[in-house]
Image: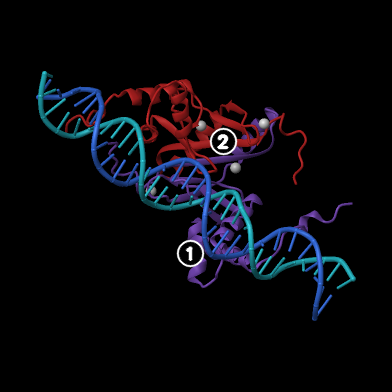
Chain colours: A red, B purple, C blue, D cyan
Amino acid sequence: MKPPAAQVGVRSTRQRIAVLDALTRLDDFRSTQELHDFLRSESQEVGLATVYRTLQALSDTGDVDVIVRADGESVYRLCSRHHHHHLVCRRCRATVEVQAPEVETWAEKVATDNGFTDAHHVVEIWGLCADCGLGEDHS
Amino acid sequence: MKPPAAQVGVRSTRQRIAVLDALTRLDDFRSTQELHDFLRSESQEVGLATVYRTLQALSDTGDVDVIVRADGESVYRLCSRHHHHHLVCRRCRATVEVQAPEVETWAEKVATDNGFTDAHHVVEIWGLCADCGLGEDHS
DNA sequence: AAGCTTAATGATAATGATTGTCAAGTGCAG
DNA sequence: CTGCACTTGACAATCATTATCATTAAGCTT
Ligand SMILES: [Mn+2]
Ligand SMILES: [Mn+2]
Ligand SMILES: [Zn+2]
Ligand SMILES: [Zn+2]
């Protein structure tokens, strides 16, 4: 009989609540630094290191989704009720949320077919939006 | 009448040949630094910055696959002819290449439906492989 | 083959996200 | 209310990647 492990050492602090609250309102992927800036813009003083630690912890427990962008920076998003993906303009960063029921089932099947469990997936589409895709010169 | 653009500015150098040759022999994902070390171990002197630039260029032209690992480091592998995605064990990094014809068409359709052009996509599945998914304790 | 133009290289400094350190602060069980 | 383990935050340290820029050398052109 081990003690209720889920409770050991987890304390509710002003900082953690602030980060979680920010994630709730910004329902998009954000980097640690962006979250930190956002909190500061609201005069919510939270140390940068603490934001890093909090997001790390939330990631470990699966409460947030993480994506490592092509430039190596990690971005986090609250694991929302409605799972969705993004279509992003590589130039202006315009973002469209997209659903993908068939991709969901495909991903799940691929994982189980290969003996994988507890699978998650990252599906992102990058392109040039209508506005940005006009006068292209492929150098 | 512009000159044959496909040739402009692309020079065949000892360094580029060496990097490409290394990628050919090491048919696994390797980081830039690992490639650089490998070349040095063979007394192939190539500047680290050059290895970075070469891999970047090969990535831009689609000649190598790139994966950004969870720690943010990018790893490269000579691109096999066929486009594919990866199913990766989040613990031991075991990797399975997967095909996804239906995802390809879905991604293309989503992009064009939203007015996006020149679209690419990222599809990665993370999970626990059969070996690693055995004795799990979810902390 | 020699000269030229300019991409390419490499030694090095700079960048910037992330992590480590540790003294001071605080949630909360008892 | 107290005590202590968990947290925090200011700051230093890492370390992969990028920027500089003087020097080298492909690949044309005579
Ligand atoms: Mn999905
Ligand atoms: Mn694909
Ligand atoms: Zn755009
Ligand atoms: Zn595994």
* Residue linked to disc 2: A124
Three-letter amino acid code at disc 2?
Glu
What is the CA distance from the residue labelled 1 to the residue labelled 2? 33 Å
**Number of the label disc, if any, that sits on residue B37:** 1
Tally of numbered tags: 2
**Nearer the viewer's eye, disc 1 or disc 2?**
1
* A132, A100: nearer the viewer: A132
Residue located 63% across and 69% down the image: B14
The quadrant where ligand 3 appears is: top right
**Residue C27, horizontal then vertical, whole percent:** 24, 23
Left or right position of B29 against A20: right
- Res. A96 mark: none
Which residue appears at 63% of the width and 54% of the height? Answer: B57
Q: Could you tell whether B61 is left or right of B36 in the image?
A: right
Closest to the observer: B85 or B17? B17
Give the quadrant of the N terminus of chain A.
Answer: top left
